[in-house]
Image: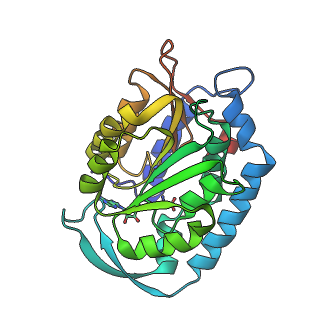
Amino acid sequence: MGRTEGLMDWGRWWLQWRRTPVASGRGDSWTSLLRARQSREAKAAAVAVSALRAQLGRSDAKVELLDFGAGHPQGGDAVSTTIGRIAREAGTDKRKARWLRAVALSTQGDRTRDRLRILEVGTSLGLGGVSLLHGSQGELDYTGMEGSPAMVAWASQHLGPWSPRLVTGPFDRTLPEEVARSQPYDVVFLDGHHEGEVLLDQWTMLQPLMTAGSCVVVDDIRWSVDMHHAWCALAGGPGVRSLDLFRMGVLIMDHGPKAPLLRVPTALLA
Ligand SMILES: C[S@@+](CC[C@H](N)C(=O)[O-])C[C@H]1O[C@@H](n2cnc3c(N)ncnc32)[C@H](O)[C@@H]1O
């Protein structure tokens, strides 16, 4: 799997990332996303998520997780941990929150529907969901998928104001069921099972649900060598424009001529 660990590994990723050409945001195809990233709404989402993450991060409430993620058996692993640890180690932080809100703000979606449809694969405590939804007033429909029932209970508290639809169970069962519903999505946040092959399978399954102009955010694209390989396969594939935020990547479904992979200016990285 080649997990990224320590300064040396991150330093190598950094040098590699810095060689990618930068999106100027001035009249290029990333202008509206970069503008949304600078908006008051995106800043407010980052502040709110940062406060919630800090509050949860101090919690020593015990929780029994059912972990289906990378390195755990297919039937899930019962893991005893604390809410504080989950928030600190797996929860969306303020840099990521700001980008997530910017994506939700700048995605046009299918104009024939009056509500943007969002799917998060790997909801955990709901910090990613709060980032996407913060400040919205009923114009967004959110579905979150999560393996661990204990996490779903916490997420439903944090996402309650937006009436989320939360789907519980391992993705190898719940994702095919979701795809079979044939409901389109405008924004997808892939932040569940961190294994390259699983990411590629999820992408293949979800692609038919993605509308033109829809946006996919992939988290932890440098979490391991195989996650990065999978990201490169998605970013270099047909029918997408791709932007590298360093820890996350953004793909826009676009069937125009293939554009080169760009990165954000260093000050804006997530
Ligand atoms: C990194 S956390 C998600 C963090 C969240 N998106 C956020 O922004 O705060 C990944 C979540 O995916 C869930 N997960 C990982 N692999 C899974 C699988 N194969 N099936 C179901 N859930 C899974 C884990 O239980 C965990 O809560």
| Above or below, comparing residue 260 to residue 56 in the picture | above
Q: Nearer the viewer, residue 8 or 71?
A: 71
Q: Nearer the viewer, residue 158 or 2?
A: 158
Q: Residue at x 43, y 51 (%)?
A: 9
| Above or below, comparing residue 47 to residue 25 in the picture | below
Is residue 92 in view?
no
Q: Residue at x 23, y 68 (%)?
A: 76
Residue 182's spot in the image, x, y percent?
A: 36, 39
| Above or below, comparing residue 30 to residue 9 in the picture | above
Is residue 148 in view?
yes
Q: Taking 140 as reference, is 241 left or right?
A: left
Task: Please identify the residue farthest to the right as the structure is shown.
Answer: 40
Q: Taking 25 as reference, is 254 left or right?
A: left
Task: Please identify the residue farthest to the left as the structure is shown.
Answer: 74
Q: Quadrant of ligand 1?
A: bottom left
Q: Nearer the viewer, residue 181 or 142?
A: 181
Q: Residue at x 65, y 48 (%)?
A: 139
Residue 268's spot in the image, x, y percent?
A: 68, 43
Q: Residue at x 53, y 33 (%)?
A: 214
